[in-house]
Amino acid sequence: MGNIYTSAEDESTIDDVLSKGLKVKAPKWTVMRLALAHSLKMHSAPDEELDRIDKKGFDYDLEQLTGHNQGHSSTGQKQDYTDAIRGLLSVHANQDLFADDASFRRHLQRHIRRGLREFRRGWRESHDFYQFLYQELCAGVERESESRDTDLSSLLIAALGEIGVRGEITATQDGPRITRYLVHLEDPNHLDRARRGLDKITFALGLQKHGVFLTESGQPKVVGLDVPRPRSTWRTVHCQELMKWAETNPAKPSGLPLWPGVTVTGSPLSFDLTRQPHLLVGGTTGSGKSICLHTLLISLLIGVPKERLHLILIDPKKVEFAPYARANSQRIEVITDVVDANRRLAALTEEMENRTSTLESAGVRDLAEGRRKGILNLPYIVVFIEELADLIMQVPETEEHLIRLAQKARATGIHLIIATQRPDARILNGLLRSNIPSRIALMVQKSTESKIILDETGAERLTGAGDMLLRLSGEPIVRLHGVLVTEDDSTAVIRNEGRS
């Protein structure tokens, strides 16, 4: 049979995993099989872009990768896994790959190369590779859950007793990552005592920095204690679910629906950006901030008709939004140069003033009213900024444009979604923050950073990887788990955007 090809970058990844991750002398196909397993764990299909190799690495025979025609070893152990791999790939691709060798090799190469790409993105040399593999390949596998829940229930009641709170667990609710324990308090006055003792409860349960959260249940004398489970038991929320939510819940003519994720009990949550009217997203490296931005972007691209929306994507790092430039869509504008970004924001403030005059002439309060009445047909404009700190530090005058837009742009249908991994008071000054009332806080390092994003603590106790706290204007904070959006998911949406 023919060969499977890798790129030079793939080969570098294989060498790094062998020497710095596995730390063993083993054939390269060992890493490639692990990469295949990692890719098959992902629900989306690997993108066709993986067929393209700019700088070739090596080629491998199926005899090496799948054990083709190897039969059994001298000890009787099976060595040929070709048919098993064909079967797995056929199910994943929903295609009979037993009858088409060329397609089988093509799908096998895509999966291996995608798995190697995910190794590059998700694993750091300073981290234990075996633990990384365990978390990636075994996440969502329940083990001894009944025994674990019973033991944890006893520990939780004991921990409550240690802080002077008496109660009993009346029910449990398992979400994608969290188990919510509904606790009936003997004395309602113990509610404040339980809230103040959350750090001690977390310590008693051995949860380290990933804290227990308290939520009011709406039932008399009953509170919910949200306890994070081991990562190996998490259920991932995939992009296909997001697409289904957005497609089956069409946007209202005056709406911009965003679907950031699911609640701790697993229910999808959405909100209308036009009612907020701007959004701040903050989180440290590895918190899932960038994936959260892709989730919000895909919500709009799928859920809002083309003629109703124009997107301006400002990406000083030239990484996250670069793929959207390939969409060949008139409603997507990608800007990577900070000077160009400043000019575009200045022009947008002029557009805001022009729209304000248009609204006054039409006799309507805002664009939403004008669209509902059929008087105005202007598109909404949503500006994404991937890293606010980089933009302001390189071109300080952009801050003035952003403040003006945050103060006045809502009525004109111009909305901001601003993200930063460096939430500090110097970058997010009081005037800018006060005009962006809605916030998403992913995991941060310090409680002071949580206060800057949310105006209260809590984000420092999140579990990372898309775990977030959402504060909408005028509403209580809600904890959500984000959607996993892969590069293949984004590429599929971008390709469809270019065709439609």
Image: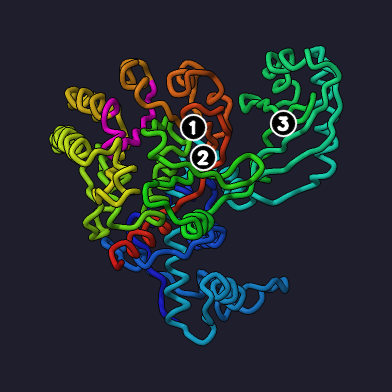
The count of marks equals: 3
The amino acid type found where label 1 is placed reads: Leu
Q: CA distance from mark 2 to mark 1?
A: 7 Å
User: Sequence-wise, which precedes: disc 1 or disc 3?
Assistant: 3
Q: Which residue is mark 3?
A: 217
Q: Is residue 23 visible?
A: no
**Which is closer to the viewer, label 3 or label 2?**
3
User: Sequence-wise, which precedes: disc 3 or disc 2?
Assistant: 3
Give the magenta range: 406-423
Image position of 277 (left or right of 213): left
Q: Quadrant of the C terminus?
A: bottom left
In x, y percent, where is residue 228? Answer: 67, 34
Q: Which residue is mark 2?
A: 466
Q: Quadrant of the N terminus?
A: bottom left
The amino acid type found where label 2 is placed reads: Gly
In x, y percent, where is residue 257? Answer: 43, 47
Q: Residues within 10 Å of mark 2 (few under 14, many from 20)?
A: many
